[in-house]
Image (tube, coloured by chain):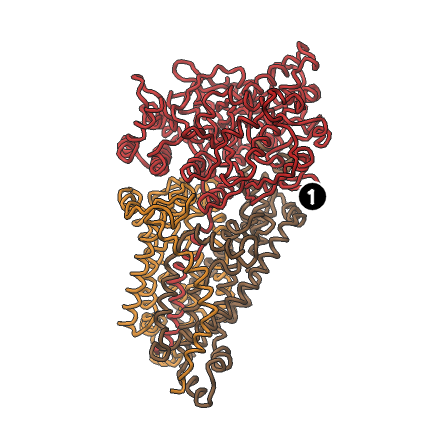
Amino acid sequence: MVTERSAVSKWFNGLNIVLLLVIMFMCLLPVWYTLSISLSDKAAASAGMVFLWPKGFTFGSYETIIHDGQFFRSFFISVQRVIYGAAISFFVILLMAYPLSKNGSDFRGRNVIMWILVFAMLFNGGLVPWYLTMKSLGMINSIWGLVLGGGLPVFNVILVMNYFRNMPKELEESALMDGAGPWRILFNIFLPLAMPVLATVLVFTIVYHWNEFFQALVLMNKSVHYPLQSYIRQVAVVIDPTKMDEESVKRASELSNQTLNAAKIFISMLPLLVIYPFLQKYFVKGITLGSVKG
Amino acid sequence: MKKSLLSAMAVMLVTASLSACGSSNDGGNNTSNAGNNAQGSNQTDNSGNAAATNTASGNSSNAAATEEAVDPFAKFAEPVEVSIGRAIDPNYKFDGTDTAEDNVYTRWLKDKFNIEIKHAWEAAQGTDYQQKVSLAISSNDLPDAMVVNETQLRQMVKAGQLADLKDVYDKYASPELKATYDSNPGLLDSVTFDGKLYALPETTLPSAPLTWIRKDWLDKLGLQPPKSLADLENIAKAFIDNKMGGDKTIGIVGTQQGGTLYSTFLSSTDHWYNFSPLFFANDAYPGIWTKDKDGNTVYGSTTEETKKALEMMRDWYAKGILDKEMGVRKSTAEVVASGQAGIFFGPWWSAYNNIPDNIKNDPKANWRAYAAPLDAAGKFNSNQATGSSYIVVSKEAKHPEAIIKMTSIHKWGKDEEFNKLTAGKQMTSQEVPLFLILGAGDQLEYAVNSLRKYLKGEMKIEDFDQANYGWAYEMAKHVKAIKKEPFDSYDIGTFDQQADTGFFTHIYAHLNGGSTFVDADVNWVRSIATAQTKTMESRWSNLKKLEDETFLKIIMGSEDISAFDTFVKKWKDQGGDKITEEVNELK
Amino acid sequence: MRTKGFAKHYYLMLLPGLIWLFIYNLFPMYGILTAFKDFNPGIGILKSPWIGLENFQYMFELDDSKLIFRNTIFIALAKMIANLIVPLIFALMLNEVKNRLFTRTVQTIVYLPHFLSWVIVAGMMLDIFSYNGPVNQILSSLGLGKSLFFADAHSFPALIVGSDVWKEFGFNAIIFFAALTSINPEMYEAAAIDGASQWKRLTRITLPSILPVAVLLATLSMGNILNAGFDQIFNLYNPTVYSTGDIIDTWVYRAGLIDMQYGLATAVGLLKSVVGLFLISLSYGLAYRFANYRIF
């Protein structure tokens, strides 16, 4: 469609591409840097000699992780948490968003409930009452504490609700003409059309459950119950020299925390890095389609 | 623009605008991330004294001293369960499938004394543990016993959560335990409130911060060990100028992220990696309560001497002598291990931890400890440690006496069977529940002096007082394989690092750091207050924050030295004056 | 009319969510009372004695209070502006590239940082900006002085905003990509026929088309003015930068869990929530009034 291409335009486009490449590189850099550290030997890493390429290449850190039973246990707990958490959130959000997308005139009580949700999003009672509540519900040392403990993801509900609200009114009206009830409208008409936003919400939920680590520190009484991020965090504890024996001194000196931590960090972000490009296809495309329509 | 597009956009926008609210408003997420790097101050345990942890004096039989009293080492008739909160080291390697809850020590405790340990919860030592303790206290969901710090102890006393241990202590504490507390006057008084004994405090073994220097670097440059501050400055400068640790040589390393510049009256034991000696050599004692010339109580951080010390440090920092990354560095230990630094401050037991790392990278790294720098009058000053760990027992605990017993047993209850079971393996806080440092205070001195005599042949192995100084005896059995002649030099070259790797660090730490400390003539300065007063409960943390922030900024040059005077004024106005009055009444 | 009797179905649909909300979000809110009490853990929140507004009084006495509110607003505001402009410019730049494979690749990669947690990102940032880290090595090889970025109260807010933009700009740009692709291509074709330059097309067609999006985005993000990013700052700050980097959330965390000043911490947190509610209501009103758009 464009025929004329001035020199200025060419120059501009070239510069533009170079800049974009630089930006892309900057986004990759820290991840690459972490990988380099994880594959370097201890001395080089702590002396700050590693940057773009591993120094004293070694798989030592990764070998240590492979022999670490707790790492895999925690990994599995995290996977479990993500699956339960995503599944439950998905259905609860879907079910809540639909009635809330109605007008106050169609569904009385809608506005009151909506403001309660907003209130719940902004206020909280603090850690102690939350902990006591969780305890009285038997959520201590339980995967369900991690799955449900964060509370209703209000913000995701609002997101889906807004999406529903902006779907063409005609769709629902014609379904009503055919005598469809609310459940059929939701599952047969709204659900298939809402895939893009649901994919988005799914991504948010997965990322949240995978990266969240603080709740486990409160709810879990033993580290065997920790999800991966909580486990990774605690390996960097300050070593108390007064209570250490030669054995641990020796082990600690073989692998610096820095390289081992880098390896653990890298492995822990790997699943998300692998998953998101696939999910991205859905939610980005979905949003784009949704906005072009109508 | 079509409205539907706008709306679809808006969906995303709301996402953006509300997500942040969400993240700080659901339950625990509010405090998410909690101690990733908050308060690096680990649960401090000053002595670092291997000796204190291991005196195997199997004398469970001689305990029934007084007729009326119960045998403190008697086995419970029925199994007694004790639930505890426990700090664990996630990196600690147990034998086989042992854990902190079920290991050779706890099994022995069960078989021999019918005391069964149950972990109500466990968390990684350091911030995670402190957080768990805080949560347990504030939600009133307490295990029978746990080890807490000063602030937590105060909070629990105030909340009335603790059992009065007075009677069970009188009845069940072994004579040795009582003797230990008696030999530390005032210690039990500091945990007695309204006549009620609320905790078992750790006894503190003296520990002054020494200056650790790479002697091989000194020799290479033909320099003498330091005496004064000026000597130290010159040495650090020479190290940097001659790139002794490579291009990135750091003069003096110290405080790391989350650490403190100096130990305080609340966490006085932690001299590890800070800059205390630079203050002490200026006759400044920040962080503790001292007397001024007229005998009035004064907070050390507000004195002219402290200002002078800060001014000096500011100058050193600007010159690049102090670590440019002080207070921000993630791990000072790593810099020492990698050989970039040739000077740091630390107690005698520093040789236990990171120096071996450095030696491993560079077997010629010859770290030596010096009782320096001295002040203008030639004195080697240090503040005196006070304890910072306490065993507390919940008011709800069914068997407070079991906890008293455990404390006695840990140090004085070990029998032949125990020695056989553990096969000489040292029991650490990872095996021993409710681990508390208890010592008469001269363990180190005895160990160092007798080892030296033994090496020179002035003492025979039979002469060792095995009953009271078991650890010294244990080391003596290994010392000859490790320490080579000349016996009066403790340079790294005179140790055989490979001969007995299990004991090398012990021997090395005792003879290198330990001997310097034992020989040093330390001018101890003790804090008038060793615990919080009433006003401190609400005001102290904010005052301390003001102090830490101002001092760091002055040293690092982002605030003028005049900021010190502003700090003093603010400090006084915001409750400091009132607190000083309260402390004054303690005298 | 046909929807008559639907209400009970609606409530049925809401039920699971409302139960969840009640148990985990609403029930623990009795903890807010702590702000008005002399909290004694031994007897619990409900039985602790009332002290009225004493916690609030102390809060206003503290130098810190003004400081943390100021820091919070400053950082949050800077983030809001930067997170609007940078993604917009980025989207415009990418929009000029016609090679689909290239744009796809760039998009995929710039989304990446969004998926990393702040614990991890903070660790990487501290490494990269450390005194002997890559950034300082580059600076010193250029003959410039080294600097301790994360220990400098002047540069700290900039680093916070910068690292936040780094992490989120790609993800935030999604909405602009969507807006850009929805512009009718016929408009460009017509402009090309008229001989309009690339620059003219950008300023005359592209920018005006997505301006409303940007304006609405700005309005809606108002509710964020007291959210400066706890996870991020908590993992990056230290006492030397408290003066510019300590925010309400980090302060509340320290006061509560570390120093055990629960009453004070709850009071500050409550004030923040109240202001947050006010701001959300305000942006709700503004969006409704001027864009006829309802946020929720």
| Image quadrant assignment for residue B442 | top right
Which quadrant: the C terminus of chain B? top left
Which quadrant: the N terminus of chain B? bottom left
Taking C133 as reference, is B536 left or right?
A: left
Q: Secondary structure at mark 1?
A: loop
Q: In the image, what residue type sits under mark 1?
A: Thr
**Chain A hue?**
brown
Taking B143 as reference, is B284 left or right?
A: left
Residue B345 position within the rendered picture, expressed as x and y whole percent measured from the top left: 49, 27
Q: Which residue is located at x 26 percent, y 42 percent?
A: C61
Q: Dot 1 corresponds to which residue?
A: B97
Taking B432 as reference, is C54 left or right?
A: left
Residue A7 position within the rendered picture, expressed as x and y whole percent measured from the top left: 40, 68
Q: Nearer the viewer, residue C110 or A81?
A: A81
**Chain B hue?**
red
Tell me if I can see residue B243 in this picture: no
Q: Residue furthest front?
A: B68
Q: Which residue is located at x 39 percent, y 63 percent?
A: B16
Among the chains, which one is orange? Answer: C
Q: Which residue is located at x 60 percent, y 32 percent?
A: B406
Q: Nearer the viewer, residue A53 or B158?
A: B158
Q: Nearer the viewer, residue C220 or A217?
A: A217
